[in-house]
Image (tube, rainbow, N blue to C red):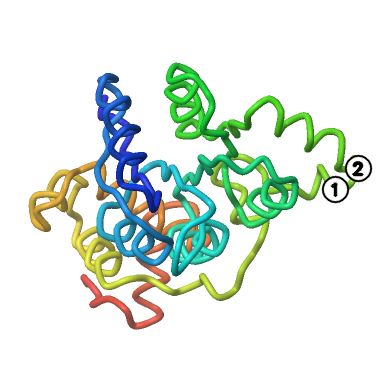
Amino acid sequence: MEPIRILLVDDHVLVRKGIASLLATQDDLEVVGEAGDGFEALERAEELMPDVILMDISMPRCDGLTAIDLIKREMPYVKIVMLTYSDDDENLFEAIKRGAQGYLLKDLQPEVLFESIRGAARGEAPISGAMAAKLLRELSPRERAELPAAGPEEERLSERPSRKGLLTRREKEVLQLVAEGLSNRDIAERLRIAENTVKNHLRNILEKLHMQNRAQAVAYAIRQGWLESTR
């Protein structure tokens, strides 16, 4: 089983290095990259295709809340977990509403962080106890129902039209190779990327196009003129 691929986003280098050192003790968790602000996070995420992004809120140039919008627009599949010192109610609510998978405070124990990352990768919504209590206390039953659902369905529910059809160059390359009948392993070898990265690209493509499987995605892409017909 391949490890969970993690991108660390924090403007403090020492914080990133400290978290990376902790995660390195776990065989099933792999830090694949780091970023110092939201803009860099988007660039690195598109390049590395992580499974989970651990991201601070307060950062220069582009803060974590704005980064959620940018990243989710391009990569609906990725799980974003806020890891911050901020226990501010407004930051918590805003992060969840924008599509963050979870919200953790930096005073947590390492074992809790490890399990929270694993849970986020499974589609769970890790939230620090004190922050979860605030959600339950402040939100009415109706508002709770409107919070983003955990897992892949959360982005389908939002139905953001700007995402439909917005495939990156790499995603179109992957889809073209799928149309040619290549397996995930063959695609990985052809593009010189990890097989797990191919899987993440495909998940991202299906989320963006709101398709159920790769065959539907290929047919749609050919109709749109993005790919060459294999007939």
How many other residues sit within 10 Å of disc 1, few (<14), some (14-19) or many (≥20)? few
**SS label for mark 2:** loop
Q: Taking 95 as reference, is 152 left or right?
A: left
* Residue displayed at 70% across by 45% down: 88
* Residue displayed at 34% across by 75% down: 222
Amino acid carrying label 1: it is Glu
x, y (%) of residue 74?
A: 44, 65
**SS label for mark 1:** helix
The residue that disc 1 covers is 143
Looking at the image, residue 2 lies above or below residue 36: above
Marks 1 and 2 sit apart, C-alpha to C-alpha, by: 5 Å
Quadrant position of the N terminus in the picture = top left
Corner quadrant of residue 231: bottom left
x, y (%) of residue 134?
A: 79, 35
How many other residues sit within 10 Å of disc 2, few (<14), some (14-19) or many (≥20)? few
Corner quadrant of residue 37: bottom left
Q: Taking 82 as reference, is 42 left or right?
A: left
Q: Taking 85 as reference, is 129 left or right?
A: right
Q: Looking at the image, can residue 209 be seen?
A: no
Looking at the image, residue 103 lies above or below residue 70: above
Amino acid carrying label 2: it is Ser
* Residue displayed at 21% across by 70% down: 230
Tell me whether circle 1 and circle 2 mark residues in contact (CB < 8 Å): yes
Q: Taking 213 as reference, is 130 left or right?
A: right
* Residue displayed at 57% across by 34% down: 105
Q: Is 152 in front, or is 58?
A: 58
The residue that disc 2 covers is 140
x, y (%) of residue 84?
A: 53, 42
Looking at the image, residue 202 lies above or below residue 230: above
Q: Looking at the image, can residue 88 be seen?
A: yes
